[in-house]
Amino acid sequence: MDRTSLSRRNFLGLTAGAGAAAALAACGSSGPGTSNGGSGSGAATYWYLSGAPGEQVRTATVNRFNKANPNTKVTGTTFQNDAYKTKIKTAIGAGQAPTIIWGWGGGGLKSYVDAGQVEDLTDWFNQNAAVKDRLFPSSFGAATINGKIYAMPAETVQPIVMFYDKRAFDKIKAQVPQTWGDVMALVPKFNAAGIAPFSLGGQSRWTNMMWLEFFFDRLGGPDVFQAVFNGEKNAWSNPLAIQGLKMAQDLVKANGFIKGFSSITADSNADQALLYTGKAAMMLHGTWTYGNMKTAGKDFVTGGHLGYMNFPSIDGGKGDPSDTVGNPGQYLSISSKATAAQKDTAKKFFSTAVLSDEEVTDWINTGAVPIVKGSDAKLASSADADFLKFVYQTASQAKVFAQSWDQAMSPTAAEKLLDNIAQLFQLTITPEKFADNMNQVIGQ
């Protein structure tokens, strides 16, 4: 799913400086990376996601590049999300990938790296420091595998944050929580007032996962999950991981979530509706939900009722409260099967067209925050300037921006993870059983 329109989930330990085919909608006819999609021997191909507003921004960038480079054009082909995931895996596996591969980084990228299907861009970035230095340092984590960079960070950043309804806090005469202890103290107060403390679309499973990502990070920092990603034996049994799992169940047992949360879906935006209609006081979710809440929530956003903050610190926790999780960017790789000339074209596309000043403006006009240092200066003119500045500060100041677990892990391990998360939140398995189940798929 395209999270530049961007809905939902998309870990690597992201340290600053270091995440059956459906119908496709094609707007071009380019083939694999070895095809001649333009008028010169260096013509390159590029597959990316369709759908507004991301498709329009990406296509405009391609068109600008082609106008400036008529002899080494980039030919774009767009795919709907599910179709793309199937198509690109098949093409890469067959050695028929496009020159430029759009992706989410993390576990998917690692699988391509392990198979020798994408170019190592580390030396290129070292030789083009200006390209690297203008991007959020945290965006490189999901592009980095075994200390080497295999993708160009691109597009926009979307952290997961804690939204809240100011009206609900006014009703119970409470202050915005600063620590997790403050949050838990608010739970019975909101319940007593007939307001669910948190909205949650638990049927979607990945929404529950966001809670664990923050519990693990705030308790022990990024190393707790990094051990899982690194394939360390019994990493899920880390005492801090067990503590985080227990905290999730403690919140469920305290009636911290809306009644029936396991039957509520996020894709329907029902969880958002619970917040803006006053039925829930808070919601942990991605910043991609802002646009819909503004549109569907009547005066909830425009009337100044929506508040937002980074996830609070946990008393005694080792994690940095500036850290965040979510989408640190989107990622462009170069097929190792492309010709030398096509690789040169792709690199020129990366350095001159991707996140150019024009593209940065295009992304901001969609209500998104590009992963470019200083782009906050362009946010002031937006009607959503306050929120976009908050997103920019959250992302740019994060020492660690963790990519969502299910994107960092292999598809097999990710599905096992989501199934066990659902059971954890339904209180049908213990934290220890969760850890035992997940330890079995480490490294898969």
Image: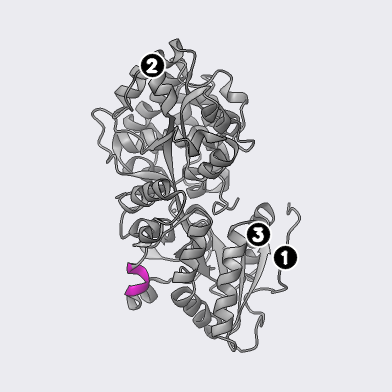
Q: Amino acid at mark 1?
A: Ala
Residue drawn at the location 32% of the way across and 33% of the way down: 312
Judge whether 175 appears above or below 417 on screen. Answer: above
x, y percent for residue 21: 73, 54
Tell me the crowding category of disc 3: few under 14, some 14 to 19, or many 20 or more residues within 10 angstroms, Cα based: many
Circle 2 sits on which residue?
Answer: 172
Q: Nearer the viewer, residue 61 or 71?
A: 61
Marks 2 & 3, CB-CB < 8 Å contact: no
On the picture, is 432 further left or further right than 410?
A: left
Give the mark, 1 or 2, whose residue is nearer the N terminus.
Answer: 1
**Element under disc 1:** loop
Circle 1 sits on which residue?
Answer: 26
On the picture, is 130 further left or further right than 295?
A: left
Give how far apart the Cα atoms at labels 1 and 2 are: 53 Å
Q: Nearer the viewer, residue 44 or 306?
A: 306
Q: Amino acid at mark 3?
A: Ser
Would you say residue 55 sits in the magenta stretch?
A: no
